[in-house]
Image (tube, grey):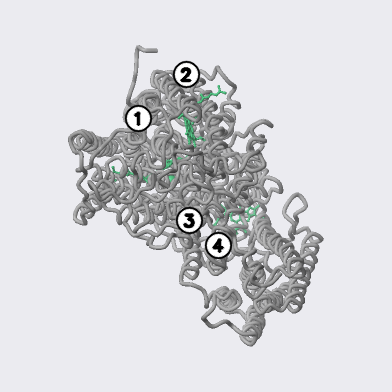
Amino acid sequence: METANSEPKTNYLNADYGIKSWLLTTDHKRIALLYLISITLFFFLGGFFAMLIRLELLTPAGDLVLADTYNKLFTMHGVVMIFLFLLPAVPAVFGNFLVPMMIGAKDLAFPKLNLASWYIFIIGACFILYAVVTGGLDTGWTFYTPYSTTYSNSNVVAAALGVFITGFSSIFTGLNILVTVHRMRAPGLTWRRLPLFIWAHYATSVIMVLGTPVLAITIVLVALERLFHFGIFDARMGGDPLLFQHLFWFYSHPAVYIMILPAMGVISEIIACFSRKRVFGYDFVAMSSIAIAVLGFLVWAHHMYVAGISTYAAMIFSMLTFFVAIPSAVKVFNWTATLYKGSITFETPMLYVFAFIGLFTIGGLTGVFLASVGIDLHVTDTYFVVAHFHYVMVGGTVTAFMGALHFWWPKITGKMYPESFAKLSAVLVFLGFNLTFFPQFLLGYMGMPRRYHAYPAEFQVLNVLSTAGASILAVGFLLPMVYFVWSLQYGKDAGPNPYNAAGLEWQTASPPTTFNFEETPVVTWEAYNYDEIDAPNKGVEVAG
Amino acid sequence: MPDSELAVHNLKHHFADLEQQKATSTFGMWIFLVTEIMFFGGAFATYLIYRLSYYNAWVAGSQTMEIELGAVNTVVLICSSLTMVMSVHFAKLGNRKLTAIFLLLTLLLGFGFLGIKAVEYHGHWVHHEVPGPNFHFEHQGNYDPRQVMIFFSLYFAMTGMHALHMVIGAGLLTWLLIANARGRFTPEYNSPVEMVGLYWHFVDLVWIYLFPLLYLISHHHNG
Amino acid sequence: MAGHAHPTVKTFVAVWAALLVLTALTVGVATLNLGPFNPIVALAIATTKALLVLLFFMELRYSTALTKISVVAAVFFLMLLVGLTLSDYLTRGWSSYINPFR
Amino acid sequence: MWSNLPLFPARASSMAGHVDALYFALVAITAFFTILISALILFFALRFRKSRSPQATQIHGSTALELLWTGIPLGIVMIIFVWSSVIFFMQTRPPKGAMEVYAVGKQWMWKFQHTEGQREINQLHVPVGRDVRMIMTSQDVIHDFYVPAFRIKADVLPGRYTSTWFHATVPGRYHLFCAEYCGTQHSGMVGEVVVMEAGDYDRWASGAVDGSLASAGEKSFQQYGCSMCHRADAAGRGPNLVGVFGRPVLLDDGRTVTADESYVRESILNPGAKIASGFKNIMPTFEGQLSEEEVIGLVAYVKALGDGSANLPLPVNEPNSGTYPVAPKAEGSAAKSDKTATPPAKTVPAKPAARQ
Ligand code: HEA
Ligand code: HEA
Ligand code: CUA
Ligand SMILES: [Cu+2]
């Protein structure tokens, strides 16, 4: 491999040519790219809706779009962002790309299933987009009954089917990763040698496999109810609308951990690399992923404190919700401790990591506000909740996603991104983000309800700030589109391991060959062996 | 094709050997079944919660079920599980002919089940027990007919979903029959048969719970 | 995989017979009035049948610990779904505002 | 627009102080941890930047530290849990003797009915310094009754009553929002709560109305033929409703439920759902024949029938007796026989005094 850089080599990108070779590929790396392209489009679609929302909220009167249109905007923003962007974002792109490489496998356990899951995703997305173009959807992303089943005039069934179908894509991705981690690890790669990224994806997959089917059956019941008036969730027929909420949140709360856990895995990888240290408390960070996955199933009714559930149940769920916050706290503290006595550099991915830790801490701790029944009573269904979940989802997951994109871009494409532009956009994103969403905490506590098309005048100042922030945020997100594309042509060649990082994925060429490794590696070291890599003179054999 | 060549042909590129490949696909299938458990589980949970709230209506709804047909169908399904397990067994032994026979028997029994189910559905249709505008339930007990409609909604949702799985299973069996006829399976490579077997048994397993819950547990109130 | 016991045709037929017997049993029991025990007995029989299918027809008995754990985990999480949902439904009546302070 | 930039909601109920106190505590905790983490990151990042710390020192972890930073947050959140649950418990349990206002949410307006008979739309007048309990239902989808200045919120569901309560402390006009998404005009389903001085309120409340809610209910009770079956003597085919409200009712399947508003409502609209022990399921459903307002009137009436004996626990009705044991209170039977009887006549203790 020493001569790798001089002559053009075949890699997964140029191994085969033509559209067909992409659309029929079973290479996990190519499928990851298919996902990357699709979800990027959906992110901008969702972002476009977000910009319209923010523009409407610039003034108290509902004067930009009609009330109905506004309702469709936030619904489609939520549905597109959650189901078409954030859920697949890290696991289906980076999980797909990296899991086999990090464990020294040639591919995922079921390559065809992997391709199928992308197609399923696209088919589901088509249903959702069909609902969007044929009049939109106005139920909110939560599809609450009986509004969704009886009263809404929009295209609920198509959208519900879309969500149902993309659910299967997520199930298959989870299944694939789960089986791969169990069955395809390279010789010597014991569980305690796995990168934390793998642990996080393992935990994520468990949630995908156990939770998503419940969403599926719930959606089926909603569709049946809407089509045939089954009465299961319809109070007029003797049904209980709250049962829908139970079933929906049984999936959708754990789903927020599908969004954050892989992002946490990303953070562990990057922070170790740029502080040249093994992640502090490896075992605890690994186990906290599992703990989050399991405890995450026990807390769903915290979305229903005031929905009419019993007081006692609300208190049980409140208590359990506090428990699930603890493993996240453990992670944050361990990441911070990792920096201690490191040898820290400030490449763009590392900036995103710093942003992540700060924003996730705020987002998570405001989750603790919401977990407190006595506070949630006041702030539920207000902008406080909106701010909370954008802090964890955008400040958390999207930030980590951006970090991951920069970190592994050289691996994916073989080219470096331009560092100074990247840093600029990271700073813009951080500032824009806080300006957008911090005012929403204040708005929420003042009582501005969410999903409001028009609002009382005294809320205007903060809303204007929020819209201003969103514009900065938009620039921050558009900039990378430009320089990433630019780097494909003009970027510096990266070489196999530009950051001198640990991890099997860095021990193969960039971009890797179709089967990742010339020879199946045999692992004899612990994860994050930066001591060996950086040790003067006795560096571990790092290819290239 | 000689066996050894066939084995190589069946080994996907990313596995070290057939053994790893088989273990992997078996585990994958079980994980898939786990998702199925959760899928049907959501419906069972709904059933349970409404049964607790609307006990009388549940009894009334359940008493309209034809126990005989349900019991016969249970037997049919159990027999199909036996024939399925036999076909797997013979596929492992490399006996193509017996594999085919038992697969065919399984398929026929599956159709038998669906046929009987169709008869039942027809009965419900005739008696206006299908939820919707035509629903009508002569009620005499201490309950509200709308609650019986919820019972039937769940009944149709659950048995319908189960029947859908049977139909998919029938498709898979047909595919196996063709592949078997083409000599795709050997004593070394037969996991498709085994996988479909697992799936088929799981569908049987769901019915094992549906039968008592929908037909039996309120039956004694008849007396 | 090679090396460990596999069920024989004899086992299969025996399990099949047991399943038929249990089916007859559960239908029979259903006609008796056991009060609250009717569902319990029916579910106990169903679970026995399910275990027979799982362990022998689906060869769970001869599978890896991992497979067994997966199945147990699914059942466990299903129980969580049911149990915690019931924690709402069963206690709703308790919180009637009238009771405690009047 | 820039003239006033409020950053904090008005504080106008007895709950607000409790909620705000916990809120500030949480803000302090959040600020503490956010600053702690950010400061540590900043400090480490600068102190251990590559130019000052060319070689990292590998530290694998420390169980003591892990326990510490598991234990401390756990301790903190458990305190928060208890604190917040106490607030929640207060909020979900209205004090006894609260005055009651019925609310019906529908796409997209709020309708309120006072027991004295006043009806309002999107405006709710309440006196300062009194406990007010809201008894709410929805005619269509889920809505949510939210008054930020009171720090209270409760979903309003179709098919049953939910309730919440408040004790306004400062006269004024406050926002009332629908906080559960309910369709096109969700953001238009707003109104105001007008908190008035007691005297002003009394003047307002005594304005022209055609009879109290309960008397309206009594009319419906006659009009819809309820009185044919529900009679004071043993001749009725249905149970005597005097003294039922607020009592435990034995059902024919052995369960016992409390006869609260939701139960009465269900008994009218869905009589088959819960059958009082000793009776047949012969009561027809009135679903579709009664508007939510009429149901509320009937509920208020049935409630008034039960009020009089509030402090005398009655035994659960005996199976097959055909009637409830009639409360040995004069008001009870008076209410039944006297056509002109209005609720104030029956609700002798405390309430009428407070109301007038
Ligand atoms: C990535 C997604 C994500 C993540 C990770 C989380 C994480 C958490 N969420 Fe959030 N949440 C959402 C996405 C997410 N949430 C969404 C989308 C909604 C709204 C859905 C809708 O209605 O549309 C929502 C709504 C929501 C509600 C319901 C609000 C309402 O509608 O009334 C609640 C209530 O309990 C809640 C709680 C929590 C908690 C306790 C955590 C915890 O996991 C957070 C744990 C993290 C920390 C605690 C920070 C780190 C800790 C420290 C730095 C140490 C100090 C710690 C302590 C002292 C405790 N969330
Ligand atoms: C992954 C999840 C995710 C992400 C990334 C975002 C990102 C953003 N969200 Fe969103 N949001 C949700 C998930 C997410 N949101 C959910 C689930 C809801 C609840 C929905 C519901 O109530 O049902 C919600 C609701 C929600 C609301 C509340 C609406 C309401 O309740 O009335 C608001 C209001 O400000 C908002 C704003 C934003 C903004 C400004 C961003 C920004 O971060 C977006 C930044 C990105 C861009 C701006 C893209 C840049 C590109 C362009 C601008 C291209 C323009 C294109 C053309 C001109 C063709 N979101
Ligand atoms: Cu009513 Cu929102
Ligand atoms: Cu949640």
Image quadrant holding the N terminus of chain B, namely bottom right
User: Where does residue B111 sit, x and y in percent of width and height?
Assistant: 78, 68
Same subunit, labels 1 and 2: the answer reads no
Label 4 neighbourhood size at 10 Å, few (<14), some (14-19), many (20+)? many
Label 2 neighbourhood size at 10 Å, few (<14), some (14-19), many (20+)? many
User: Given contact means CB atoms under 8 Å apart, are the residues at marks 3 and 1 in contact?
Assistant: no
Label 3 secondary element: loop
Residue at mark 4: B28
User: Where does residue C93 sit, x and y in percent of width and height?
Assistant: 46, 56
Chain of the residue where label 2 is placed in the rendered structure: A
Label 4 secondary element: helix
Residue at mark 3: A105
Residue at mark 2: A58
Q: Measure the alpha-carbon separation of dots 1 and 2.
A: 36 Å
User: Where does residue A30 sit, x and y in percent of width and height?
Assistant: 56, 44
> Which numbered circle lies on residue D128?
1
Which image quadrant for residue D185? top right
Q: Which residue sits at x=54%, y=47%? A: D160
Q: Is residue A393 left or right of residue B92?
A: left
Q: Is residue B77 left or right of residue C55?
A: right
